[in-house]
Image (spheres, rainbow, N blue to C red):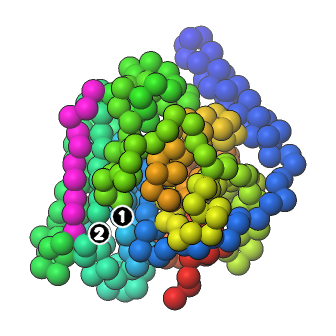
Amino acid sequence: MKSRNCTRLLQAIVVGVAVVLSACTQRTPPSAALPSLHVEPARVDVAGISSGAYMATQLHLAYPEIFHGAAIVAGGPWDCAQGSIATAVTTCMKGVPAPDAEALAKVAQARAAKGEIGPLAKLAGEKVYVLHGKRDPVIAASVAKAAADFYGALKAADPALASLQVTYDGDRDFTHTWPTLDAGNACDTVAVPFIGKCGFDAAGAVFAALYGPPPHEPTNAVGGELRPFDQNGLRPDGKDAFLAEKGYVYIPPACQQGQACGVLVALHGCMQDSATVGEAFVRDAGFNRWADVYGVAVLYPQARISLPANPKGCWDWFGYTGANYATRDGVQLRWIVAALKALGLSSN
């Protein structure tokens, strides 16, 4: 009993320290707004890991007319939790029971018919890449496979979606981490900042899956600029989106020079926000050097720790921002769309 009480006390202290650190790092908000770029609407995509992977599917389904592809790393199918934290930590993480991809596809069809998410016909011709490590102890393989099966079920139900491209990459030997060539922890480590030296460039794989083969190999050093910006200035209707005060955007040289530029929204996982890991994800995940190659800006929104519902700084994939979290009315989804428009995405 004493051991259990000590464990609970330690957990409370860890959460409390995280909240204090978050408050300290956010005390002076950045004044900079997002820069205005020449955004190519056809080259706007989203990628995420863990809670960010779930958020990526929500963005893709809510706004398939905006996001032309999604990369899902260490995550499961769209709106797997259905607003239940109990379902989130069992079915949608451990796969007990495994997610029912066909049933979720039917839910998506019903919501699309009501206009709660986007028109599913817009998924035609789009690309989905699902990446999962064989040694991941947090997200079961059956959960990751269900992410691919969900899109497959949508495709099977509608002949108009025959051109939807779904790739499942689940045979690589890494754990619950963002795999890189040589940055981060040992590849078999599950710990902050959840970036691992795995000899595999996940960022490069994501870019290739969503944007096609690279025109040339990247250099070791990035040539663009990583800028912080004020996230509070983009609150939808002034509502709290449960985000940190500071986000980041990486702008490649071509985009800085006014050339047509794609945008990849890159979503961190739980305990991978800037208050917890600093700039580790936005600098070391590997996106920025590939952004230079493809001429694609990278938007790094930052969620924030909020008690009691979100002590680990996760994106909302189970309902802590409200019942409409996975719909076009979801406050975090609307915030990200507003950020894209601030970057220069046409509102047409």
Determine which residue is flagged by label 1: 69
Instruction: Please name the amino acid that badge 2 sits on.
Output: Glu
Could you tell me which secondary element the residue under label 2 belongs to? Answer: loop
Residue at the image point whose x is 19% and y is 76% from the top:
161
Residue at the farthest top position:
2
Whether residue 176 appears in this view of the structure is no
- Measured as percent of width and height from the top left, residue 203 is found at 42, 43
Indicate left or right for 36 with 316 as reference.
right
Q: Main secondary structure of the magenta part?
A: strand
Indicate left or right for 224 with 142 as reference.
right
Does the residue at mark 1 contact the one at mark 2 (Cβ under 8 Å)?
yes
Between the C-alphas of marks 1 and 2, the distance is 5 Å
Instruction: Please name the amino acid that badge 1 sits on.
Output: Gly
Indicate left or right for 256 with 61 as reference.
right
Residue at the image point whose x is 52% and y is 67% from the top:
261
Could you tell me which secondary element the residue under label 1 belongs to? Answer: strand
Residue at the image point whose x is 43% and y is 68% from the top:
43
- Measured as percent of width and height from the top left, residue 2 is found at 59, 11
Instruction: Between residue 161 and residue 305, name the one nearer to us.
Output: 161
- Residue 142 is labelled as none
**Image quarter (top left, top right, bottom left or bottom right) of the N terminus:** top right
- Measured as percent of width and height from the top left, residue 40 is found at 49, 74
| Magenta part of the chain | 164-173
Determine which residue is flagged by label 2: 126
Indicate whether residue 165 is drawn in magenta.
yes
Residue at the farthest right position:
28
94 above or below 51? above
Q: How many marks?
A: 2
85 above or below 112? above
Whether residue 184 appears in this view of the structure is yes
